[in-house]
Image (cartoon, rainbow, N blue to C red):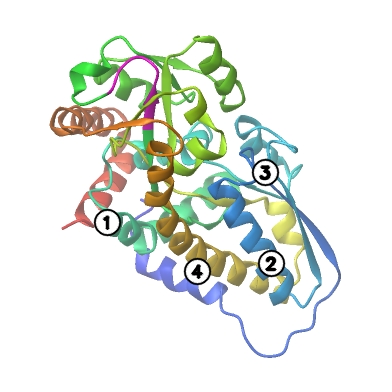
Amino acid sequence: MIFSHVKKLAVALLASSAFGGQVAYAQDLTINLGYAAAETSTYGVLAAKFEELVEDYSDGSIDVKVRCCGQLLTEDEAFKALQLGTVDMFIITGNNVSPHFPLMDAFVLPYIFQSEDHAYQVLEGDVGVAFANSLQEATSVHLLTYGFVGNRDFFNSVRPITTMADMAGIKVRVPRNQVMIDTFEAFGAAPIPLPWADTPTALQTGTVDGGDAGTSFIMSQKFYEIMPNLAVLGHFSYFTPLLASPRIMDELSDDQRDAVLRAARDAGAYHKVEMASQTEGIRAFLSGEGGMARSEVDRTAFIEAGLQVQDKYAAENGEEFKELLISIREAAE
């Protein structure tokens, strides 16, 4: 069970990220860090800070090259490339990690976090440490930081969303993730799985009527130009996992590894504060200058449907998944 002895795992991870004193770096090294979103997105904020801090903490022995906008790979391709070592580091949203590590779906479940404090208590505590260790043991991929936790806001071109009944029949773009498909079906919508790269065209052509994304992505992708309706449902949370290949981690000297782990931790802390300060401002832009109509939502039925999806997955996905879900729920108590 991945959550037995979590305190030992927490101590081990904290010890591995300790950094201090004088260091001697073995060699200069270049790290290519990719992400598929726009440079102005929340991923760009995390990547830029990580680049700055790694180069500082390594005394210039590590040069981070940030590649935005899918220059290296799409998110659907990136996790496997990390395992193979053909890409060094990548920021991948959790639902696109799930096909390679199904336990990630516990964090994709609707209304899994009751509040922002609950989310960070889980991810920054024993549960988050144990999960990162389990991911590495199962896939060899290193999870360096969870970063900012936000919610996916819903947008569409059909009608304002004020109750769950308003979702009926709306063609919703979703990632290729079964939890998200099942959730929108439970909401009464018609989910259509599409890669992120195909989403702007699908929205413009009417292949789909709407979708959801982190608040900053709606602005950075300029979806407000084609989608008139905005609803803050709070249905899916997301974090911003910075992932590293085992190959690049093995190439680091001990001191370089310490620098990378420290930079990831500090960049994640910065990202958490910076994006929290931006989110309501972005929503104000979207419903103001951006021209979107933001509706007030009665979430009662959405939450009830989301809890039913949680229970369904708990019943169908084995003891380890149940244990993780229980650990997440208990952290809110």
Q: CA distance from mark 2 to mark 4?
A: 23 Å
The answer to whether mark 3 and mark 4 are in CB contact below 8 A is no
Query: For mark 3, what is the residue?
Result: 82
Q: CA distance from mark 2 to mark 1?
A: 29 Å
Query: For mark 2, what is the residue?
Result: 52
Q: Amino acid at mark 1?
A: His
Q: Amino acid at mark 3?
A: Leu
Label 2: state its secondary structure.
helix
Label 4: state its secondary structure.
helix
Q: Amino acid at mark 2?
A: Glu
| Comes first in the chain, label 2 or label 3 | 2
Figure check: 332 above or below 98:
below
Residue 54 falls in image quadrant: bottom right
Closer to us: 68 or 132:
68
Answer whether residue 35 is visible to the viewer in this image. Answer: yes
Residue 51 location, x and y as percent? Answer: 69, 62
Give the side of residue 255 with respect to residue 294, left or right.
Answer: right
| Comes first in the chain, label 2 or label 1 | 2
Query: For mark 4, what is the residue?
Result: 13
Q: Nearer the viewer, mark 4 or mark 1?
A: 1
Closer to us: 198 or 13:
198
Closer to us: 220 or 127:
220
Q: Residues within 10 Å of mark 4 (few under 14, many from 20)?
A: some
Residue sitting at x 35%, y 14%: 158
Q: Amino acid at mark 4?
A: Leu
| Comes first in the chain, label 2 or label 4 | 4
Residue 80 falls in image quadrant: top right
Q: CA distance from mark 3 to mark 4?
A: 21 Å
Q: Residues within 10 Å of mark 1 (few under 14, many from 20)?
A: some
Query: For mark 1, what is the residue?
Result: 118
Q: Nearer the viewer, mark 3 or mark 1?
A: 1
